[in-house]
Amino acid sequence: MKQLFKWAAVLVILILVQACAQPEVRTVRSVGATSEILVVTQTKQQWDGKEGEAIRSFFGQDQFGLPQSEPLYRIANITISNLSDMFKKHRNILIVEYNKKLKEPVVEMRSNLWAQPQRVFKITAPDADSWVTAFDEQKVSFLSLFNQSERERLINIYRPTADYKVIEEVEKTFGFKLLIPEGFYVAKNEGNFMWIRKELIDYGQGLILYTRPYRDTVDLNNSRLIYVRDSLLFHHIPGPVEGSFMSTEKEYVLPQSKAISGFNTSYTVETRGLWNVVGDFMAGPFLAYTVVDETLGRLITVEGYVYAPGKDKRDFLRQLEAILYTFELPQKESDGEQTELVE
């Protein structure tokens, strides 16, 4: 009997050793240029036909709020016969497929199928018309998830290079968290207004954070948001020439605000547009998120702007978007205590 237990113990040890010796299966890191979608068709004719036209028309439309024409996404095409392991690592993939046996289109989505982070969408349809119809019904959702994939990649890049000195100053000043990578520094901190900058030789990026009391929903409409923004920029962000100051461009491109989902709060308004410097020739795009902090009865705005003369600006702005999406309010108290509202 003792001999039996001895051999059983040896067998268990061997099994454990073998399990530990098995190589860990890891999902490879996704590849692809920023803001790029790989479209996989069965034939080149599909890409040249109505399917490709529908894809290019939607994902190739201009990104709102940029001073020059730039598409939402660059689009590359290959046929299914060329979908090698290398192309399978692409971060954003859309597959066009046909099956005449189907009565209606089938839409599939997989996350991290061949790489990480990754979004793979496939629409299988009996014919071209039904494929385009299915795409039109799903394209907004596709865009939202492709955007999420882009942000996830950038956040994964920024996290190891986080500047905790700046992060801690933000949290100490405002009470919320924001992942800020190295290269940014606090240029101004006025308690309820903070200006954080990153200045390189050929371009600059900035973060503007501010709070004010929340009165009612009127505070969240576009005109009120821009009025508050311009008032704060006039007082806090001077231009390079005496008497000049940052403001919101309202002639070339009117700023637009809309409620969005997916941000790390229950209700968020996104504002996009152009900024300029009154009294000088500086300008560029900006992106802002305004949220309601119900616990403290205040509005919080976290904003990013780009200054990159002579350069494309979409990807610089997308980098700031990823940073802003790391915004996190502290958890509400669970003991039922009420926090005094800010007047």
Image (spheres, helix red, strand yellow):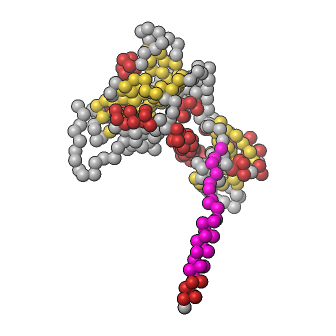
Image check: 208 left or right of 44?
left
The relative height of residue 304 versus residue 129 in the rendered view (above or below) is above
Image check: 96 left or right of 192?
right
Q: Residue at x 77, y 44 (%)?
A: 44
Viewer-nearest residue: 261 or 207: 207
Q: Which residue is drawn at 36% across and 20% down?
A: 231
Query: Residue 290: horizontal and vertical position, in percent?
Result: 39, 34
Image check: 241 left or right of 112?
left
Furthest residue to the bottom? 1
- Residue 242 visible in the snapshot: yes
The relative height of residue 186 versus residue 128 in the rendered view (above or below) is above
Asked if the magenta segment contains residue 268, the reply would be no
Furthest residue to the top? 242
- Residue 224 visible in the snapshot: no
Q: Which residue is drawn at 77% across and 51% down?
A: 81
Query: Residue 312: horizontal and vertical position, in percent?
Result: 61, 26
Image check: 300 left or right of 240?
left
Q: Which residue is drawn at 56% across and 23% down?
A: 200
Viewer-nearest residue: 11 or 250: 11
The magenta stretch spans which residues? Answer: 8-31
Total tally of numbered discs in the picture: 0
Asked if the magenta segment contains residue 26, the reply would be yes
Quadrant location of the N terminus in the rendered image: bottom right
Which picture quadrant has residue 230?
Answer: top left
Query: Residue 162: horizontal and vertical position, in percent?
Result: 49, 38
Quadrant location of the C terminus in the rendered image: top left
Query: Residue 20: horizontal and vertical position, in percent?
Result: 60, 66
Viewer-nearest residue: 132 or 16: 16
